[in-house]
Image (tube, helix red, strand yellow):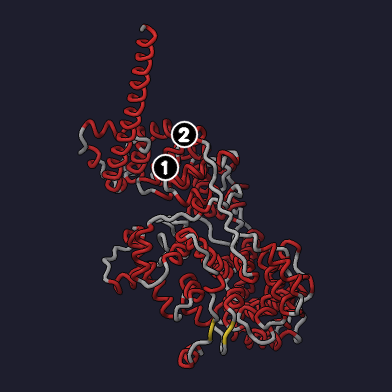
Amino acid sequence: MTLRLVSLKLIAGTIAAIFLLLHGQSAASAEIDTQRELFRQVYESVERGNWTAVDALSDKERRLLQRYVLWPDLRASWFRAEIRTADHEAIDAFLDHHGTLKPARELRYRYALHLAKAGKLEEFLNIYQAYYQGLEIARLDCIALHAELDAGRGDRIINRARVLWLTGTSQAEECDSVFEYLRAQNLLDDDDYRARYALAIDAREFTRARWLARSLDQSLLDQAGLWLQAQSNPERFIKTHGPRASDEFTRQRLAYAVERVTFADPEKALELWKSIEDAHTFSPDLRHATLRHIALWTARDDLPGAYELLTSLPLPEQDEEVMRWRARTSLRHEQWTDLLNDVAMMTADERDSEQWQYWRAVALQRIGNLVSAHSIWETLANERSYYGFLAADELGITYSFEHDTLEANATMIDKMAAREDLVRARELFLVGLDGRGRSEWDAVIAYFSPEEKLQAAVLAGRWGWHSRAISTAASIGHYDDLTLRYPLPFRQSFEQHSSTASIPATWALGVARSESLFMRDARSSAGAIGLMQLMPSTGRKVAREIKLPYSGLDTLTDPHKNIRLGTTYLGNMAERYDGNRVLATAAYNAGPHRVDRWLPESGVIDARVWIENIPFNETRKYVRRVMAAETIFHWRLTGEVRRLSDELPVVQSPPEDQQLARR
């Protein structure tokens, strides 16, 4: 009886402990959900410098928000917005307490600039010397030099100031006062000006070179003017100066002018080059570099004589890029023996890549060596990639998806999920500050072991943070968990809007993954924004077309609206190119005006060959990446294999009326 009572007490105690644990977890989860919502509620106002949004909270809400892991971000945002009027002691205290966090580091930079602008140079210098000296941030370096001057310590700045002077590009405007001091003290002589002038010429900053020449002599001023002529009207410059050029500088300008013409018209550039090549003694390096430039652009534009120009270059000039375009040109014109020779002459790494092994097999097949071709394809078919899928198609065998779910280590994942630095990163992501979250995540996991990164990728996937899951797994060479690497976020939106646009959802998913890794706030260097990377002008135009209210950045960073706009535009491109997704994909990336120019003048061309000859490296890789991703997404959604080759219809020349418009 006693034993039974003990057992019952133990069971009751265990149940109570489990209840308290679950209740505690539930309460903690509810608290952070509330904190997150409060942060979202006030952040936009605080970022504009309005702290009253926080003051309007109840005492309980405010205390809750102050315990939130992103409270420092909120304070830093307000300090940045109110930097001119904020209490310096409060800023100093904040930086002392939170100085290692990214929002504090950003605030410190802004604070340092504010101190300098307010004339508090000694205070600025204290921060600079503690945190920025030696980082080669020209703006801060020059303010520090100005502070030394202001303190009467001009002897300390001379060597550092002269280093900052010697740049061919524009220097930070904060350096102007330092350079004025050097000039006033006669510490910049003609040799210093000539050195910077030469750097400006090398950087093709001819307007700056002309400004520097004004402090030197008329001959350098005239030289800068001639460089500007070669830049602004290269063809006229060649015709004017080509017949009587005799000095090395004129020859360099002529070669530069030919280079400028080449971008627009390689055939005209070659004609102009021939008109001056024999009349002057160009150095071998200059001559070969100019011919290489013309040859590459002739090949990219698929102009007559491209292969002859490429192969006539001296062997030292036939680098990897030249060899690639030799092979592409041979491929385009179905010169299979030449293609085999081109591939054989590549470096080992290039020659052994999937790309050139696949085309080597095609060439071997075309000349009748089926055994060797099939052997290469059998090896490639083991790869889950664009060329691996094409190789499997050649053999008529199934694709090697090799999906393998990453094994989760619950103990390690729980430990990571509780780390404050990763909790910060996760919360930044969940409140919509995705970019800041990615930056903090990447900084933390940079020091993880491979096994820790593996588990971090699993954790990010569980959080729905797909960009970090994909990139973290890839950073350690783990590519086989297709659920993790090819997720299905916003699936309903993709399926609904793709259906409306009459395109496959798998294609739209492939585009979104290739464009942004599903980052809603992604921005490209060209200015494209959002999940499907739309230019603002394109987003505005498509929104008008489908009568979707358009608010610029807010619309483009809304995942569902971005998907609607992106799928509509993708559908427009598919319609423009009669359903040819290869051309539509290329147009989505590079613009339809470029794709129209890349179409064959007459007849048809194998889509695989057309893709290989896309002039832009980025677009060529992009099309291959999207087509392979679409294949994987189709398998993920349906469990069925859709042959990649079936999605590569021939590329046809445009109708005659469109050809006339191209000319």
Residues under labels 2 and 1: Cα distance? 14 Å
Q: What residue is at 67 percent from the left and 78 percent from the top?
A: 331
Residue 183 visible in the snapshot? yes
User: What is the crowding at mark 1: few (fewer than 14 residues within 10 Å), some, or many (at least 20)?
Assistant: many
Residue 243, image x, y percentages:
69, 88
Nearer to us in this view, 65 or 333: 333
Residue 426 got which mark? 1
Label 1 secondary element? helix
Nearer to us in this view, 556 or 415: 415
Residue 310, image x, y percentages:
72, 78
Residue 564, image x, y percentages:
34, 65
- Vertical placement of residue 128 versus 591, above or below: above
Nearer to us in this view, 553 or 215: 553
Residue 414 got which mark? 2
- Vertical placement of residue 252 versus 385, above or below: below
The residue under label 2 is which amino acid type? Asp
Residue 372, image x, y percentages:
76, 70
User: What is the crowding at mark 2: few (fewer than 14 residues within 10 Å), some, or many (at least 20)?
Assistant: few
The residue under label 1 is which amino acid type? Arg
Q: In the image, 632: left or right of 108?
A: right
